[in-house]
Image: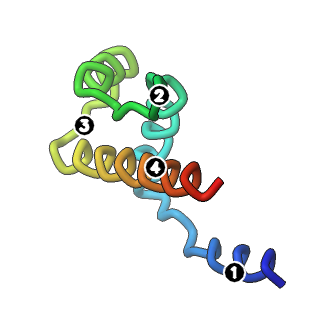
Amino acid sequence: MQRAKHEAALICPPLPDEFAYLWNAFLRLNARRSVGFAIEPITFLELDAFTRLSGLRLRPWEIAILEDLDLLFRKVHTVKKDAE
């Protein structure tokens, strides 16, 4: 019963194709983030290096979305860790 409840909470609409490149950028940045006692935010230095090396040119609103995804990831990870 609990599992079904949690799985139902995870159901969400599919990611629009137009934003797949931002999700992929976040996943690539997330895989290389620094981790100390806590998950560190993705820094502007890391973002700058990523955009230069990948050739992906991001506009300010796209950077804001990556920042929001980063913040959400860290919040969820913190809540999950606190629940353990």
Kind of residue sitting beneath label 3: Leu
Q: Is residue 8 left or right of residue 71?
A: right
> In 3D space, how far apart are the residues under numbered discs 4 and 3 (Cα atoms)?
20 Å
Contact (Cβ within 8 Å) of mark 1 with mark 2: no
Which residue is at a point 60% across and 58% down the rendered structure image? 83
Of mark 2 and mark 3, the one earlier in the sequence is 2
Tell me the quarter of the picture where residue 11 sits: bottom right
Q: Nearer the viewer, residue 6 or 55?
A: 6
Kind of residue at disc 4: Phe
Three-letter residue code for mark 1? Ala
Depth check, front residue: 8 or 38 = 38
Mark closer to the chain start, 1 or 2: 1
Of tags 2 and 3, the one toward the viewer is: 2
The residue beneath circle 2 is: 37
Closer to the camera in the image, 55 or 33: 33
- Residue 13: x and y, percent? 55, 75
Which residue is identified by label 3? 58
Label of residue 22 in the image: none
Task: Quickly name the residue at label 4.
Answer: 73
- Tell me the CA gap for discs 1 and 3: 34 Å
Name the image quarter holding residue 33: top left
Question: Which label sits in the foreground, 4 or 2?
Answer: 2
Marks 1 and 2, how far apart in space? 32 Å
Q: Nearer the viewer, mark 1 or mark 3?
A: 1
Helix, strand or loop at mark 3: loop
Q: Check whether the beta carbons of the residues at disc 4 and disc 3 lie within 8 A of each other.
A: no
Q: Earlier in the sequence, mark 1 or mark 3?
A: 1
Q: Earlier in the sequence, mark 4 or mark 2?
A: 2
Mark carried by residue 8: 1
